[in-house]
Image (cartoon, coloured by chain):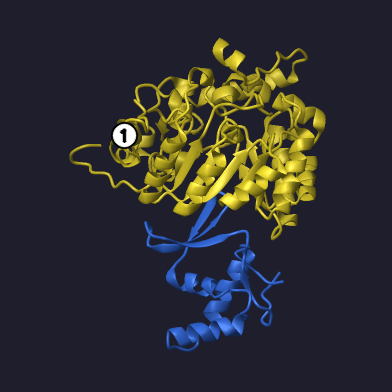
Amino acid sequence: MAGLNKINITPPRWLLAELTYKCPLQCPYCSNPVDYAKHSDEISTEDWKRVLTEARKMGAVQLGFSGGEPLTRQDLPELVKHARELGYYSNLITSGYGLTEAKIIELKTAGLDHIQVSIQASTQDLNDHIAGTESFYSKQEVAKLVKKHGYPMVLCVVIHRENIHQMPEILAMAEELGADYVELANTQYYGWAHTNRDLLMPTKEQYQKAEAIAQDFKEQVAGKMKIYYVIPDFHEARPKACMNGWGTTFLTIAPDGVALPCHSARDLPNLDCPNVNDLSVAEIWNESKAFNFFRGKEWMQEPCKSCDEQDKDFGGCHCQAYLLTGDMTKTDPVCHKSPDNHIIQEAIASARESALSTNEKPLIFRNSKNSKRL
Amino acid sequence: MSLNLEQPICFSPMHRLQWEEAQQKDVILYPEGMVELNQSSAEILKLCDGERNVAAIVAALEEKFSTTGLANDIMSFLEVALENGWIKQD
């Protein structure tokens, strides 16, 4: 990092503003930290405005308002307005729960560009079970209102073993609701999803079948609807190029002001992730230990160190390496070149065994009671 | 879906075209994505105002840059733009 190997630092382009960890839903694959209940502080409206201003000055242009459920922050319209004045493209990433038509209009007037609504399944029973909250019909209503008011509408469905068989119905529902984009996000196994992995991970046959259906549909609706398919990396031979390279593009600010190079990085040890209460966004991005930690290749071990694909995937996901091996500087175990790849194969086998057994244990839902217990 | 030569072309209301000071270039913004444009692509898209058709766009750019023979390049870019949903024809 320091000294001889001066690394060229590119400015942030994507700012993910996790406004709150509060959420009316309890999805058992939530990407928030399992111990989120410990981090209940939230920075003020003025702090958020300063963060938006500073990041925009550096070059951030895509802005995600996320959470938790961002609608629980009463100052959301004020933040959206500030973001619009700065020239951001603002994305609201919401469960849709509690989103009224009046609020949709208010946010549009404030300058919101796009609303992404999550839906958990194509049937009420399963949606409400997975969300842990009765929400299926209100989500459908919200999706229609989003369209009615001229927003591009993205429907996001997290895919896992409980809903993967509904792929044809999920796609039909998206078409009926008039989605402009459908994000089929195969569960990534961090946080709550890691806790529930045996119960959530589909079998390879299920993935293959679902992917073929999604591919067919993609061709059918070409020109009308776009499909984003988030790959199930456990079944790939090479890791994902996590965050497009650490500290190159993405900046996440957690509800309490902690700045993260990736929204899972809070769980990594000894990164000393900085807080926007103490430092400017420029200082955080350019100078902090956390953001410089995986820039460049100095940190690499074998097989990454001599791999001819190191510029393509940057060694994969450090959070996954840490979660599965205890060492965040190791090669992502998903990679078939990793000496730890057996951990992935064992996880797939374990989930498969759970899928085939008749007495599966129950899912652990994301709520503050479970958060304090885990 | 292919380009209609007669009909006017408008920039998609589902996208935003914007100059980015930090990048010193025009970009197209859409849900969770961004396309960086070179100068000629940006010049073409700025003329997709819902009133001009292909011929009018070609004429305007040939006049602006005091040149001729741009029609093929402009049309092939507009085909790409249509395919990506950046422009629309009613």
In the image, taking residue A176 as reference, residue A69 lies left or right, namely left
Count of marks, rendered view:
1
* Residue at the left extreme, as displayed: A3
List the residue tagged with mark 1. Answer: A279
B4 is higher (above) or lower (below) than A43 = below
Q: Nearer the viewer, residue A323 or A120?
A: A120
In the image, taking residue A200 as reference, residue B27 lies left or right, namely left
A170 is higher (above) or lower (below) than B72 = above
**Split into 4 quadrants, where in the image is the C terminus of chain A?**
top right
SS label for mark 1: loop
Q: Position of residue A45 (x, y in %)?
A: 47, 36
**Split into 4 quadrants, where in the image is the N terminus of chain A?**
top left
Q: Position of residue A110 (x, y in %)?
A: 57, 50
Output the letter for the chain in yellow. Answer: A
Three-letter code, disc 1: Leu
Q: Nearer the viewer, residue A327 or B25?
A: B25
Chain B's colour is blue
